[in-house]
Structures are given as C-alpha cells and as structure tokens.
Amino acid sequence: MRMRKKKHGAERIEACSELLIRDISTLKDGFEGIFDKERPVRLEIGCGKGNFAVGMAKQYPDINFIAMERVSDVCCIALEKAMASKEERESDNLRFLIGDAKLLAENVLPHSLDGIYLNFSDPWPKAGHAKRRLTHRSFLEIYKNLLKEDGILRFKTDNVGLFDFSLEEFEAFGAEILWQTRDLHASEKNADNVMTEYEKNFSEKGFSICSAWVKL
Ligand SMILES: C[S@@+](CC[C@H](N)C(=O)[O-])C[C@H]1O[C@@H](n2cnc3c(N)ncnc32)[C@H](O)[C@@H]1O
C-alpha cells in the first residue's frame, strides 16, 4: 500500500499509544500485560487501515486481537480508527504492532497464537518475488511455530494467482486445508465475515473473494 508521508505522523501515532505495542520483543514472553484480560490471541498480518481488526474486535469480545502493519503511516490510520471506536468495543481487546512479519519469528512466544489472518496480502506477481508472498512456505514455517496446535491460518484474497499459489504452498508444506471457497460472499461463512478495505473495494467492482482456512 503506497501512501504519501503523513504530516505529524509520529505525533498522531503517539496520541494512540495506549493501543500500540511499542516493542515487539516484549511478546517473547507472551501477552501478559498487553491486554486488560487474558483471552485467546489472534494476529492479523498486513492490517492496512484497520477495518477488519476494528470490526473483529467489536464482533468477538472474548478474543484478543493484534493487528500488524509494516507501514507506519498506514498503521497510523488504523490506530486512529481504533481509538475513535474504542467506546463501541465491549472489551479492551485490540492492539497494534508496527513492523514487518519477518520480525515475528524471533520476537513472539512460540505456540502462543490461536489464529493468524492474512487479508489481501500483496500478490508479488513476478515469479522472482515469490519468496516475498506472505503465503510462501518460509512464512508458513514461521506461522506454524507461532500457532498453537489447534490454531488456524485464515486467508482471503481477490487475486486468483495468489490464491492458487497459496493452495500449492499449503499442500507442499503438508498443511491441512480445512475449508476453502472461491466465492466467500456466497458461502456459508459470509454471515460472520468482516470485510477489509480491499475486500469492500474489490467486491464492489464485481470480483469474487477467495478464502481458505488452514491447519499448518
Ligand atoms: C494489499 S494491502 C491489504 C490491506 C488490508 N489487509 C485490506 O485487506 O484492506 C497489504 C498490506 O499489508 C502490508 N504488508 C505487506 N507485507 C507485510 C509484511 N511483511 N509485514 C507486515 N505488513 C505487511 C502492506 O503494507 C499493506 O498495508
């Protein structure tokens, strides 16, 4: 997601600091002290402007959510959205991390996550860039180590090429595909589905949304 540099970005992020995990390495020991209460923790990687994380935290007060985004100016928008909607959440169950998914392996307690969401991850269409895709097997290895035994990776995309690649990666990795569809909005899971910014945009343009739930 490209974005013009935000004016006063650092100050704006600072104003939302109560929702920010400043130092990812504090997660090496787990999530104690991060949320008001211990609950299962789910992580969204590449949260963009935060619609999904904010919607999920409201819809599921018994789950703690961490939304991660590597572009600080994009995360700033998500943070501000989360601050503005704070009163709408029954629980204090949403936090943000600014950083790259690569940092997770070294900084998050293994087998501590209940779920991971990848929503409309950058497709990196050139074959030479396959390793950058967030469903490349090198990332699956990281996620497997972070997820609990029964944890689930949930993936959504409009991009058929990325979806096909991801299914191949899941299979090559030996993962179990629990559920998949090439038309999420026509599926039985649509009733509980919280849309992301990209999802709203692409589905309004007539694109079907592909999705898979995977046990790594
Ligand atoms: C195409 S956008 C989708 C945003 C949002 N998930 C949505 O569905 O509307 C992908 C987002 O993932 C972020 N991203 C890409 N690679 C990442 C990585 N390795 N770690 C963290 N965030 C990443 C990008 O900065 C961008 O904001």
Image: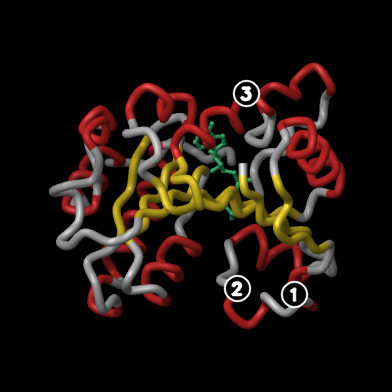
Q: Where the N terminus falls, by quadrant?
A: top right
Is 152 rendered above or below residue 188?
A: above
Mark 2 or mark 3, which is nearer the start of the sequence?
Answer: 3
Q: Amino acid at mark 3?
A: Ser
Query: For residue 201, what is the image quadrant?
Result: bottom right
Identify the residue at horizontal 34%, vertical 58% (top origin): 40
**Of residues 24 and 77, which is closer to you in this image?**
24
Cβ–Cβ under 8 Å for marks 1 and 2: yes
Identify the residue at horizontal 41%, vertical 25% (top origin): 103
Query: For residue 179, what is the image quadrant?
Result: bottom right
What label does residue 69 carry, if any?
none
Residue that protrudes farthest toward the front in the picture: 149
Q: Which residue is mark 1?
A: 185
Q: Which residue is mark 3?
A: 138
- Residue 48, visible in the rendered structure: no
Type of colouring: secondary structure
**Of residues 61 and 88, which is closer to you in this image?**
61
Q: Amino acid at mark 2?
A: Asn
Residue 107 locus on image (x, y percent): 33, 27
Q: Where the C terminus falls, by quadrant?
A: top right
Between label 3 and label 2, give the one nearer the viewer: 3
